[in-house]
Amino acid sequence: MDLSHSLPREDELLLEGRYHELNSEWDQAIQTYGSLWTVWNENPDYGLKLAGAQISADKGQDALATIAQLRKLPLPDRDDPRIDIAEAFAAQTISDFKHELRADEQALKNARATGASFVLAQGLMDECRALYKLGELGNAAQACESAQSEFALVGDKTDVARTATREANIAKDQGNVEEALRLRKHILETIREVGSQRDIAGALVNVADLMMDRNDLDGAQRNYEEAIKITRDVNDKGHLSQYETDLASVFYSKGEFEKTKRMYENVLLSAQKIDDKEGQAVALANLGSVIYLLGELDEAQKSVRTGLDMSRGLGTKRDVAASLAILGDILLAQGDLNGAEKTYVESAQIYEQMGEKGNLATSQISLATLALAKQSAPKAEELARQGVTECEAEGDAAGAATGRDILVQSLIEQNKVAEATEVMKEARKIQVQDVIVRLSLAVTEARLEGRTGNVDEALHSLDNTIKSARAMKLIGYELEARLAKAEVQLDAGATPTPPSDLKELVEEANAKGYHLIGLKAARL
């Protein structure tokens, strides 16, 4: 660029724009390509370069305005399939996945008509992404396979790996964990050979996801942090919020809830700045889940419902199902059993339609928890066993531990103490790092200890759990542990809890919105 000033103005601007593009200086690239397109607006390449820079800067609406100008060019330029691809990418940045899919379909039609092999491959890869976002996993997998074949034909290793990443995500969601692991290992090797920093970041995140499933929180955190650093270095705003959300999930599992809340709030602000509607919806749901744990149930419900409405509007089925699952937990804690059942069932139906076995298993465990609240222990046992089996097949340690937790509770309610003891032994073998899962297991194990006569040990364990929950400001778990302590004392018939203490628990639980715990305490 330093040597370009003697060139004709058109060539000088083209070179300057490329320089800014290579350095991820998107505002400067937009300004330079905008100048080119304004003066030489008969050349579609310049309009496409401007739209590409606007997309990279997450200015999707601006890119769509540029694309509208390109559509006014005379034939055959206005039917250039690259314009369709640019429109799909621009729609993606504003989370309009139905618009993205329509643009991809038009790109494929025009690419086939003109023999544009590379654009055809791009269209298939993006079609795979849009279908995945809309929950059509089978069709998404077919599009990805076709895209891989097309990219291989034109010798594009980077996009072969990118497409394989999407295939791995689909395989994981469909319950084929081993295939997902094989694909991700191969992808990381390929991308390191190519040297694309942006794609290395994505591969690191994919490996971190599997580490999370296997309870390696420290390893997952290292990978997420490295990916975030790379993403910031290359100024990839589109993926930064996504990776920060992933890192927040590590803090969540470690019990660092105030830090998690701040991260989700920052992710929400970032998504709002770039008009990323899907990012906003997911951040609102995640933020609601943390606020719920910290005891602000009404505020949590409001946040999750706002995110849920946005996800419904976008048609992102996976996000809808996830938000419904969180909403179900909040409604259950508030004692709205019918509302919780409605949301859990809808969430499970979406996951079943999408073929997402792992998430469906988690839904079954949620429904088992609801069945316990409805005092239907046999139904809870049946659902919990189904959930545990699938979680173990998926390699989801936290899910398997949670399922066994609910299973033990259902067996205790049916006075199957010996069987409950065996299941708890299996649960203890699972090395779970998730703080929430561990707290819940501790309460359940103490209840079981009380039933088997180890009253002093049970009470000591519950006192420690109450202290831990209080330190982390987990009001619901503190109340639950206090309720369990009262149950153990009453069942043992020794050092009973004074009625005044239980009345206080009823009043406190109801005052804080935990009406289900208030109802259970009132029964005692």
Image: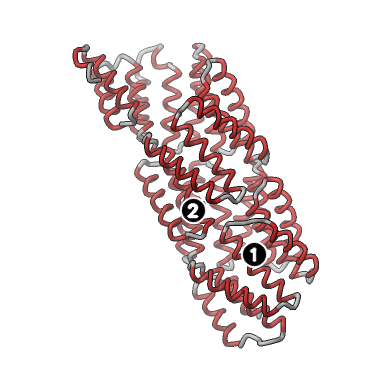
Question: Up-down: is 463 above or below 132?
Answer: below
Q: Position of residue 449 (x, y in %)?
A: 71, 73
Badge 2: residue crowd in 10 Å (few <14, some 14–19, many ≥20): many
Give the residue drawn at x 66%, y 86%.
496
Badge 1: residue crowd in 10 Å (few <14, some 14–19, many ≥20): many
Query: Based on the displayed image, in which of its 4 quarters is residue 441 positioned?
Result: bottom right
Of residues 490 and 517, the one nearer the viewer is 490
Q: Amino acid at mark 1?
A: Leu
Q: Position of residue 510 (x, y in %)?
A: 53, 75
**Of labels 2 and 1, the one closer to you:** 1
Q: Would you name the residue on which mark 1 appears?
A: 441
* Side (left or right) of 51 relative to 177: left
Which corner quadrant holds the C terminus? bottom right
Indicate the secondary structure of the residue bearing disc 1: helix
Query: Based on the displayed image, in which of its 4 quarters is residue 367 positioned?
Result: bottom right
Q: Position of residue 13 (x, y in %)?
A: 25, 19
Q: Position of residue 6 (x, y in %)?
A: 19, 13
Give the residue drawn at x 68%, y 54%.
400
* Side (left or right) of 19 relative to 95: left
Q: Earlier in the sequence, mark 2 or mark 1?
A: 2
Question: Up-down: is 242 above or below 128?
Answer: below
Say which mark, if any, is on residue 286.
Answer: 2
Q: Amino acid at mark 2?
A: Asn
Indicate the secondary structure of the residue bearing disc 2: helix
Which corner quadrant holds the N terminus? top left
